Amino acid sequence: MLSEVFLTFAVSSFIGCVLGIVTFCYRSKCREFNFCGCKIVRDVQLEEEFDLEMMKNKNSEVKTQENI
């Protein structure tokens, strides 16, 4: 029989891997993702626009600090 410690480790590792994959998918900005029969389709246009706006703001902050 499997020990309780091993089962706890196995379940925790599995959950960690699943959460890691979900995090990777979210950060990847992919429009469509297939994994083990699970298909995820999402609209990333708003996220891309937000990221571009954040990059513009960072660039303008750097330029103003250089002028000081």
Image (tube, helix red, strand yellow):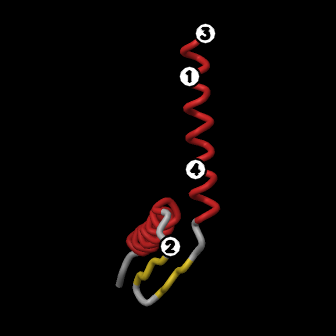
Tell me which numbered mark, 4 or 1, is placed earlier along the sequence. Answer: 4
How far across and how far down the image is residue 19, in percent?
Answer: 50, 67
Circle 4 is placed at which residue position? 51
Height in image: 48 above or below 7? above
Q: Quadrant of the C terminus?
A: top right
Q: For this rendering, which residue is in front, 19 or 40?
A: 40
Give residue 63's mark: 1
Q: Residue furthest top?
A: 68
Mark 4 to mark 3 CA distance (whole Å): 26 Å
Give the residue displayed 59% in from the left and 17% down from the top: 65
Query: Residue 22 appears at what percent x and percent y?
Result: 50, 68
Q: Amino acid at mark 3?
A: Ile
| Contact flag, marks 4 and 3 (Cβ < 8 Å) | no
Secondary-structure class at tag 3:
loop
**How packed is label 3: few (under 14 Cα within 10 Å), some, or many (20 or more)?**
few
Q: Is residue 60 left or right of residue 24?
A: right
Secondary structure of the residue carrying tag 4 is helix
Who comes first in sequence, dot 4 or dot 2? Answer: 2
Label 1 sits on what residue type? Lys
| x 45%, y 77%: residue | 33
Q: Closer to us: mark 2 or mark 3?
A: 3
Tell us which disc is closer to us: 2 or 1.
Answer: 1
The residue pinned by badge 2 equals 31
Name the image quarter holding residue 67: top right
Examine the image and state in which quarter residue 54 appears: top right
Which one is nearer the viewer's eye here, 36 or 29? 29
Q: Which residue is mark 3?
A: 68
The answer for how far apart the CA atoms under marks 3 and 1 are is 9 Å
